[in-house]
Image: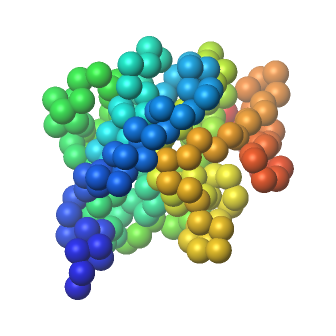
Amino acid sequence: MDIGKRAYSEFRDTNLLEEGFNQAKKLHNNWSSINDIDLICVSPCRRTIDTALFVFKDHKANMIAKDFLIEFPIGGGEKCNQRKNIEDLKYLYPMIDFTSIKNNILKWGDEDETHEQLNNRIQEMICWIGNRPEKNIAIVSHSSFIGMLKDKKIGDEKNELKHCHPYNIKFYYDENNNFLFLINEKNVNKLKSFKNM
C-alpha cells in the first residue's frame, strides 16, 4: 500500500503537505478581496488550521474552529479526518477560538458517516451562519464538505474542486434567520427550508 492510501487509514489528523502550504501562501498574496473577510471559521483538523493561518496571515478577523466543518466521513477507517483532542489543539494553536467545541475528544464510530449525516452538519453550519452578525465569513473546510455544500455531490472527478480556492457562496435567510436558499458561482441550489434550532 502506498503512502497516499496509508495516510487516510493509518495516520490521525494528518499534516498539511508542502504543496498545501504553497497554495495557501499563493492565495494569501493573490486574493483581492481577502480584507473584506469579517470572520474565519475553520475545521479543527491541523491541515485546515494551517491553511487558514497561512491564507489569513496578519489578518485581524477572529478565527473560530467548528467540528461541523470536519471532512467527510467522520467515523470509519479514514483516521486522517479524526482531529486531535481539543486540549492539544488549544496548546498548538492558541490563536484559534475552540470554546464552542464542547467535546474534547471527537466521537469516532466504527462505521463511515452517511451522506444524510453530512447534510445535517451542513445544515448546522448554515443555521450557525444565519445567527452570526458578520456578513463576510470565510469557511476553511475540505473538498467533500464543500462539494456537498455548493453542488450537492461528492467525488465528481470531472468537476473536481480547486484546492485552496475562494468559492463565493451567498446564503439567504428570512427575517427570522430561517434559511431560504444559497447561490454559488455556478448555479442556484434551492434547499429545503428549515427552522434554526
Tell me: residue 105, above or below residue 147: above
- The image shows residue 67, relative to residue 92, as above or below, that is below
Give the x, y percent position of residue 189. 80, 52
Q: Identify whether 7 is placed above or below 147.
A: below
- Can residue 118 be spotted in the picture? no
Q: Position of residue 160 (x, y in %)?
A: 59, 66
Residue 76 appearing in the image: yes
Q: How is the image coloured?
A: rainbow
The residue furthest bottom is: 1
Q: Position of residue 52 (x, y in %)?
A: 40, 35
> Is 184 left or right of 91, judged from the image as shown?
right
Residue 110 falls in which quadrant of the image? bottom left
Work out whether residue 25 or residue 100 is closer to the camera in this orientation and state it: 25
Query: Quadrant location of residue 167?
Result: top right
**Which of the two residues, 135 or 82, is positioned nearer the viewer here?**
135
Q: Quadrant of the C terminus?
A: top right
- Residue ID at (37%, 51%): 20
On the image, the x and y values in percent for residue 131 come to 63, 23
Residue at 49%, 39% (x, y): give it: 27
Placement of the N terminus among the 4 image quadrants: bottom left
| Left or right of 41, for residue 35 | right
Q: Is residue 197 left or right of residue 117?
A: right
Q: Judge by depth and name the residue closer to the eye, 10 or 163.
A: 163
- The residue that appears at 46% across and 33% down in the rendered structure is 28
Q: Residue at x 29, y 22 (%)?
A: 95
